Image: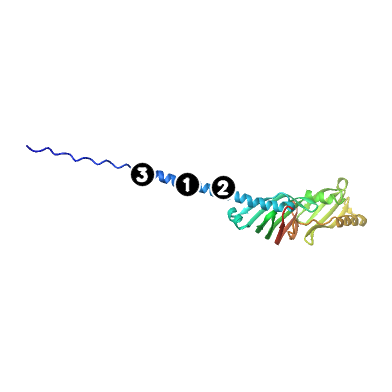
């Protein structure tokens, strides 16, 4: 009688390893995402701190502005120095003039405590709108009713007095780095204005102190645009004294 063959016992099937690998990958991805979020939040917070400090340092001189940092906020905060910043604002006070628009690029801004610091170089433009020019000249005693820029001629045409009967033409100029105006012509109801009247206008313009362009910003050129008067700024080694 032939003996019956005995079946060998089956080995247990090993559990699949793929699910464990997928869990590990998910955990690694979740950790990387959390680290990226934390780094991004820290970068955003550092950028906000640097921008706020620059805005505070410029506020006493340029009024409320918006600073946009170029590059890493964490790096700028660690070094205490921002390589590049763009500053913009629409209500800058320039001496007796208010409401000027500024757009400036600051290179190499170093800030210390209380908003003090230095800027290696400043480039940009300051625009004094026609309405701000009208208010400024009106404060000198000239009853200016209208200011019309003439970019082609490089002058401002003013309507003075009731109904603008007196037309005064002014040419903006820089006087020791400050904005001023020179009389270019005057006519009364279409005829040349009397010398006594034009001399009175010159005296009033001379009595009005030229407007300084912010904190020693060193304008290099002035021109008339459709908006008003535009100053080109190009300064080196600007010192910031802070809010105090």
In the shown orientation, is residue 32 left or right of residue 156? left
Q: Earlier in the sequence, mark 2 or mark 1?
A: 1
Q: Residues within 10 Å of mark 2 (few under 14, many from 20)?
A: few
Residue 93 got which mark?
none
- Please give the residue where the numbered disc 3 appears in the rendered image: 18
Could you tell me residue 13's position as x and y percent? 28, 41
Query: Observer-nearest residue: 114 or 181?
Result: 114
Q: Secondary structure at mark 2?
A: helix
In the shown orientation, is residue 55 left or right of residue 9? right
Q: Secondary structure at mark 1?
A: helix
Q: Secondary structure at mark 3?
A: helix
Residue 31 got which mark?
1
Query: Observer-nearest residue: 190 or 117?
Result: 117
- The picture quadrant where one finds residue 209 is bottom right
- Please give the residue where the numbered disc 2 appears in the rendered image: 41
Q: Residues within 10 Å of mark 1 (few under 14, many from 20)?
A: few
Query: Observer-nearest residue: 218 or 147?
Result: 218
Q: What's the CA distance linking mark 2 and mark 3? A: 34 Å
Q: Residue at 36% x, 44% y: name it.
A: 18
> Which numbered mark, 3 or 1, is in the foreground of this view?
1
Could you tell me residue 32's position as x and y percent? 48, 48
Q: What's the CA distance linking mark 2 and mark 1? A: 15 Å
Image quarter hosting the N terminus: top left
Q: Earlier in the sequence, mark 2 or mark 3?
A: 3
């Amino acid at each position: 009688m032939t003996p019956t063959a005995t079946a060998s016992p089956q080995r247990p099937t090993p559990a699949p390893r793929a699910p464990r690998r997928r869990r590990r990958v998910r955990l690694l991805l979740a950790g990387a995402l959390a680290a990226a979020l934390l780094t991004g939040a820290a970068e955003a917070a550092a950028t906000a701190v640097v921008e706020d400090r620059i805005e505070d340092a410029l506020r006493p001189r340029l009024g409320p502005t918006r600073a946009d940092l170029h590059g890493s906020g964490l790096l700028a905060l660690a070094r205490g120095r921002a390589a590049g910043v763009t500053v913009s604002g629409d209500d800058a006070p320039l001496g007796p003039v208010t409401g000027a628009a500024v757009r400036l690029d600051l290179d190499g801004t170093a800030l210390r405590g209380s908003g003090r610091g230095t800027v290696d170089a400043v480039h940009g433009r300051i625009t004094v709108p026609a309405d701000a020019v009208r208010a400024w000249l009106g404060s000198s005693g000239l009853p200016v009713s209208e200011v019309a820029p003439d970019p082609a001629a490089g002058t401002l045409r003013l309507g003075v007095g009731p109904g603008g009967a007196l037309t005064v033409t002014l040419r903006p100029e820089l006087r020791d780095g400050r904005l001023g105006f020179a009389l270019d012509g005057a006519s009364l109801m279409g005829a040349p204005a009397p010398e006594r009247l034009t001399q009175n206008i010159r005296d009033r313009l001379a009595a009005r102190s030229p407007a300084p362009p912010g904190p020693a910003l060193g304008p290099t050129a002035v021109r008339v645009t459709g908006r008003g008067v535009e100053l080109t700024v190009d300064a080196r080694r600007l010192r910031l004294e802070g809010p105090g």
